[in-house]
Image (cartoon, grey):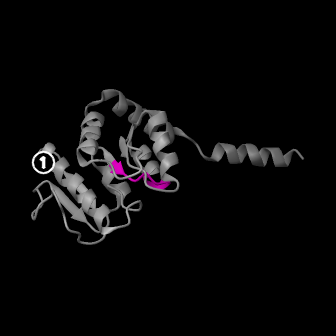
Amino acid sequence: FGTTGLRSRAEYGWLLDVAARLAHRFPDCQVVAVSPEQVPRGAAGASLPANLSVHAWIPLWELLSLRRAAKVLVTTPGVGALREAIASGTPIVAVPRSLDQFGAAARVEYFGIGQALVERELPAVDDVVERVAHVLGDAGIHERSAGLCRQVADFDATRPLERFFAGIGRR
């Protein structure tokens, strides 16, 4: 879970409710949530499931790139989270809230590397859980995520610079 698109205590409460529901739905999975402050949880209840950990901050790249088990990033997808998910081959459930997040969510859908829940208000907790279940079980999404990861890893960013400098040398 990313945090930059959430602003209020109520929105962070929603995030923890989603995380708790995911932890109950997928008891053999580890659910990691980021909430910068302690917030009241509605449906999550007073105690967290054993397979749910909540942190004020996490190194997202390390979490995504070092875990080899099946994974899905549920995020308010800024460009940074999108880049790190693609570079690690991690499928995404995007819940855009503002700014560049809508463009990132559109790219998730366009490249087929996850699903987006684009709604005026935060989506229902069960809707997010169902999208995660779908993405976890969709082999095509995982294949496209891995393929895009390979393309990014194989891309040589120096080539455009070489062409630019070669063009300058001919003038």
Please report the bounds of the magenta region as a residue range. Answer: 74-81
Q: Is residue 113 above or below residue 30?
A: above
The residue singled out by tag 1 in the image is 24
Q: Is residue 39 above or below residue 171?
A: below
Taking the spot 34% from the left edge, 52% from the top edge, the residue there is 122
The residue lying furthest to the right in this view is: 171
Residue 158, percent across and down?
63, 47
Q: In the image, is residue 108 part of the stretch drawn in magenta? A: no
Q: In the image, is residue 75 part of the stretch drawn in magenta? A: yes
Q: Quadrant of residue 36?
A: bottom left
Residue 9, percent across and down?
30, 68
The residue lying furthest to the bottom in this view is: 37
Q: Quadrant of the N terminus?
A: bottom left
Q: Nearer the viewer, residue 97 or 38?
A: 97
**Amino acid at circle 1:** His
Taking the spot 36% from the left edge, 61% from the top edge, the residue there is 3
Callout 1: few (<14), some (14-19), or many (20+) C-alpha neighbours within 10 Å? some
Q: Quadrant of residue 143?
A: top left
Taking the spot 27% from the left edge, 57% from the top edge, the residue there is 15
